[in-house]
Image (tube, rainbow, N blue to C red):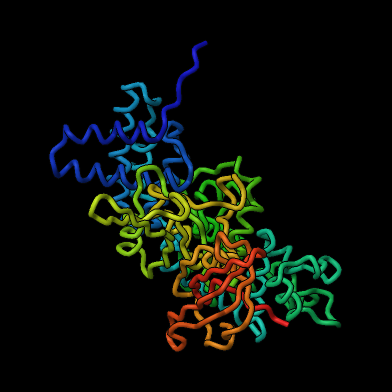
Amino acid sequence: MTETKQHTNREHIDFFQSRLDTLSPETAVKYRRTISELDLFLTHHSLQLADLNPTMTADWACHLLRKGLSKSTVTRHLNILSTLAHSSARQGLTTSTDAPRALARRLADTTLPPLINEHTFKLCLDRLRHTITHISTATHTSDDLLLYSLLNGPLDIDRTATLRKKDICIETLDETSRHIVERNIHPTRLYIFDLRQSYRTPRQIRAKIAEDLSKTHHYITTPNNQPIDPDHLIRSIWAALAIHSGATPSQALGCLQGPAPYTIPAFIHTNPRAAHTLPDWNNAIHTLLAPQAPRWYAIHLRRGTDINEIRHEITTHIHPAPQLFYPVETLSQRTGTRNTTRHQPILTNTAFIRTNPENITPLLARIGHKAWCYRTTPSPTSPYATIPPTQMRRFQAAIGIFTPDNHLHPLGHLTPRPGETVIIIRAGYADRHAQVEEIINPHSPTAIIRLRLTTEQGYEWRINADPREIQRILS
């Protein structure tokens, strides 16, 4: 039996672009937009166009709807993809599929869930973070119960509502869950959350929770204005957070034990193979919900990409724009009578981006075709790796190139005085000791420390260093 070769995404995209020459200018513009949107989606989620099927097609359509495209625009993209896919099949690049055309016919009659809207999702995210950041004050029991269910499962509402003190070990909980439990627990009550379980039936408890959540999450609309179903809400918010963190809708649905109708459209297929990725997405959701300062991420430029292309994408399309750090050193070369300079990267094709954890996934969805971000493990479902601030400051000190967030401290505080012995942490000096000989421009933010170094043979020499490139020897 002859094995069929699976063609790469680049081969498919190149073939699609070759078809543009046969189209009118107006039609070619529409096709080019479809190809660009498809290329970004495939790159960001590490999917192969050779595996195009109803599940992948539905995920892409949901991705476009989440970006704010109308159903009519998404329908046009699906019809164009169908035409391109059939052309690709005739060339033997892939097998024929009617999935895009079938979904395009179905999309017009599909009611979109509320949390697929980016504005509604942000309202939900703000509500969850408000519950977390006001952790020392009294909040509604149902809000705490919802948040605890999201962070630990997700759990069904009945299970969370009937949690007893003996059912959990507080020491094993994450910090947010532990604080939620501690502010709800009571010495004389059997259950953790005060829902008057001894006086209400399970049905009455669910009705009370549904009523409370319908008030606090009023931006989520339901058919005929029915009260929110608590289990549907928990799974829907979990799915929305996972998708925002980088999961496809089919992956998010595959991790859940039931429907998520407030986030996942009815046309999405379940990916049962994604169930084992539940812990990874739970970790990503914890990172998304926890209030955190901006983090540093390392990205690798794809072949043929210039850093200016990344910089243009960020400044043009990402607001607020993240901080981009691409350290280079300037090299001078004399050729005959001319002096030329060139900029050489410290790390080839590697740049650093500083942004909030919630923004890294949308950012990569925009620049994923030009750069990829390092993850904590080789798995494409693992969270993106962050660089601790202390390591980033030490790296910048070692190369002698700093970002504005790496502040200079007042002279005489962390900056040494003349005559002191310090340790040099600049690359190439291997933590050598040196004596501060002079401080140039001491009252300027660009102060320079002149250091004197000696050897055992009695030789000495001097170098100029940035205050951030040295460490004081504290007694």
Q: Picture quarter containing residue 207?
A: bottom right
Can residue 236 be spotted in the picture? Answer: no
Rendered location of residue 326, percent (x, y): 42, 60
Q: Is residue 105 above or below residue 427?
A: above
Q: Residue at x 56, y 73 (%)?
A: 452
Rendered location of residue 245, percent (x, y): 52, 58
Rendered location of residue 443, percent (x, y): 45, 89
Closer to us: 85 or 140: 85
Closer to us: 425 or 113: 425
Q: Residue at x 57, y 57 (%)?
A: 385
Q: Picture quarter containing residue 236?
A: bottom right
Q: Residue at x 54, y 71 (%)?
A: 469
Q: Residue at x 65, y 59 (%)?
A: 154
Rendered location of residue 350, percent (x, y): 46, 53
Closer to us: 256 or 151: 151
Q: How many marks?
A: 0
Q: Residue furthest top?
A: 1
Q: Is residue 155 above or below residue 89?
A: below
Figure quadrant of the C terminus: bottom right
Closer to us: 262 or 173: 173
Q: Is residue 189 above or below residue 284?
A: below
Instruction: Determine whether, in the image, residue 433 is placed left or right of residue 294.
Output: right
